[in-house]
Image: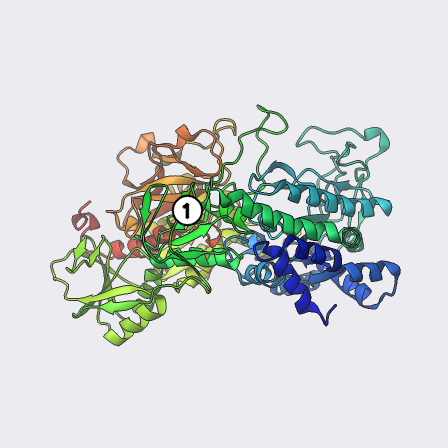
Amino acid sequence: TIRDLPRYQAMQRELADPRVTSPARAEEIALTGKTVVLIGANVHATEIGTNQVMNDLIHRLATERSAWVDHLLEHAVVLLIPSQNPDGQRMVVEWYRRNLGTPYEGSPLPHLYHKYAGHDNNRDSYMLTLVETRYLNQVLYQEWLPEVYLDTHQMGNRNARIFVPPFKNPPNPNVDPLIWTQVNQLGQAMASKLHEADKPGVIWGELYSGFWQGANNTNPWWHNMVGLLTEVASADLGTPIRQQRVSASRRLRLPRGESLGPRRGLGLPLAPPRDIQARMNYPRPWLGGLWTPADVVEYHALAMDGLLESVANNRTTLKRNFYAMNQRAIERFAGGSPYAFVIPPGPGDPAAAARLVRLLQAEAAEVDVAEAPFVADGTVHPAGSYVVRLAQPFGRWVKDVLEPQRYPDIRWPYPGAPIDKPYDVTAWSLGMLMGVDTVQVERPFEAELRPLDGPAAIPPGQVAGSGDAFVIPHDANRSFTALNRLLAAGASVSWATEELDLGSGRRYGRGAMLVAGAQRAGMVEIAADLRLLGAAADIPDELPRLPIHAPRVALYEPWGGSMDAGWTRLVLDQHEFPYVHARSADLRAGDLYDRFDVVILPEMNSVHLIQGLRAPNVRPEYRDGIGAPGIHNLLRFVEEGGTLITLGNTAAFAIEHLGAPLVNVVRGQSEEAFYCPGSILRLAIDVTHPLGYGMPREADAMFVANGGYRTARTRRNADVRVVARYPDAPLLRSGWLVGEERLRGTGAVMEVSSGKGRIILHTFRVQHRSQTEGTFRLLFNSIFYGPAVSGLDTPFSTLDAH
Ligand SMILES: [Zn+2]
């Protein structure tokens, strides 16, 4: 088999494209080929059992001469990724060894186990911002096209011992139902193997749903591949845990929130499991006892055995169905409803459109370019438009990532039941996240189309015209990379506070970046490297402008790690912002304004921010929060001229502890009255305010259980400027929103002036998981704007035409 790998890869490509592979040839492959199954381990670095089991499996497949292994190898190609996050694995091992034999043995890491993403590294499957996800996607969708993918994880350790499929409601409407039956069959093959070995605690049909795209194991569903998940109960990293046993007489289900035993502490056993009611999808509940890393490995090993055995036994069916589903996807969309998506190259940033197309291509979508203008659903689209026709093998995936999501507002298990929370966000429409127009076309149309045979081209950059100064538009994220490079090189940059017309069609909205003191050669190099359309010009001195300086930025990160801080670091690094990483001690130390112009507080709750980590097994050096001294210092920092930026729900800290005169109108609402767990909402932006420069008047905001803000009644005259708000119009663009009317008209991005400085509150997820490229500029603007206006002799409002 190993000698013949290219032949097996070629067979997968044949099955994946029924347009070139006849049914007879597909049947021949189904009868004579091998099922390709890929197993990934340890994407979450603290889930250590999943990659230990890989060593055993590899050794067994390579050395064991048994009928079982021979049968498997005859009918399957087994691909293994022993660690999907090797850096994280190393961090966890070093941390565990450092604490072994101390009171802190098995304690959680004080920082993220991935440079940027931490646990969110399994939330990246449609945006591919992380190199690890890109590698996985390359194996899945470019190199191997396996029929089956299993992602192996560990979960909490209170109740069930292992989750296997089926998944719970709701099913995503774009997944072929044959995927679900195959997922269920292979999930139950894993469950069978565990029950054959007499293992308790096997659960299915709960916990993990069939709707969300973001995880490694879910994204394959829309590619007609059987994506599977196992979750085994964790020990304390490598240290066993003991859990009190439930006695037979106490086998009853306790109401939510009630606990039977003492709370967990050092040396004490865990409280007994609460979920002990046997049911059809959990026939033999776990009742407590000792749980060791060896148990974790054994459960994983048994599940994998069950999967591999079933994959070998069902080789022909799995391969036949992969071909059939690819064929069906083509037939499903050939007649339209919908037929295609059109991605115009403008009027926004053409590079952003190209970047979206590249993401589609990375997951094996086929994209065409229009060679001439064409009409689709009555609309004329220009030459150069990208066209993605859905009648292609993975058309279901393209539809799902480009259309608005409609999360079914059906309460499970019956209409009117309390809200059954979605597993993660309910929206991922890529065009909205990236600020790129995508037009859904319902009816088939004729057009002169050329298939893209390589990555979508990003138009080259240039510096047009001549003059002493240079102009860079404000409406591209890369403009800020250029700005950071220019400031670092000592150039003098300001933002035009009025629109700028340089003639010959070169018009710039407010915020055009005016560069003086730079060499043309340097500007040309930056424009070429960043693909920016700049211009040289003579700028009239009287043009009003806001001088920009290189700000000294501190990004706070709490002990225990913050994924939001991590993703913020990724976004800042991508755009070459200089910043320092501030810990609680840095904010407690005082004189913040002597050291920083901008302090960014990531999304986190106030208790964690102020008190730090309190669990008894946290090492003392990783416990502190900012405390009362940190609050005092932040207040003084703002009074003296500093800019404090809060992200997401950290607005609550600014209101409760720093006196920001705002009220979150949806705070404390019941879920029946207001619920928005992760949706894309319409946002109206004041583009005359420097915080809104370079943004469209209407944008899309990622809202993940965030708030809507009004000025506090008692502080009507407080200096609050609302720069972005939820308009008085339908708000939901993609996902699920209960109680929309409560949010209408409330503020989303506010500037609260205080003393010589300000607090800028981005209350939705402006840089959520590094995915919301369409709103990054709001964050970037705030980093430069605050220090710029704090440094002015006269208040900015005299310059502001607003
Ligand atoms: Zn996990």
Q: Is mark 1 within 8 Å of ligand 1?
A: no
Q: Secondary structure at mark 1?
A: helix
Q: Quadrant of residue 70?
A: bottom right
Residue 489, x across and y down, in percent: 30, 72
Q: Quadrant of residue 298?
A: bottom right
Residue 211, x across and y down, in percent: 58, 41
Depth check, front residue: 256 or 342:
342
Depth check, front residue: 351 or 554:
351
Specify the quadrant that holds the C terminus: top left
Q: Is residue 684 among what the camera can see? A: yes
Depth check, front residue: 447 or 702:
447
Horizontal side, residue 483 vs residue 330: left or right: left
Coloring scheme used? rainbow
Specify the quadrant that holds the N terminus: bottom right
Q: How many marks?
A: 1
Depth check, front residue: 225 or 684:
225
Residue 590, x across and y down, in percent: 41, 56
Residue 718, x across and y down, in percent: 28, 37
Q: Mark 1: few, some, or many residues within 10 Å (few <14, many ≥20)?
A: many
The amino acid on which the numbered mark 1 sits, given as a three-letter code, is Met
In the displayed structure, 175 sits above or below 63; it is above
Horizontal side, residue 542 vs residue 93: left or right: left
Please name the residue that numbered disc 1 is placed on.
432
In the displayed structure, 296 sits above or below 721; it is below
Q: Is residue 36 among what the camera can see? A: no
Horizontal side, residue 331 vs residue 687: left or right: right
In the displayed structure, 502 sits above or below 403; it is below
Outermost top residue: 416
| Residue in view at x 71 percent, y 34 percent | 259
Horizontal side, residue 222 vs residue 502: left or right: right
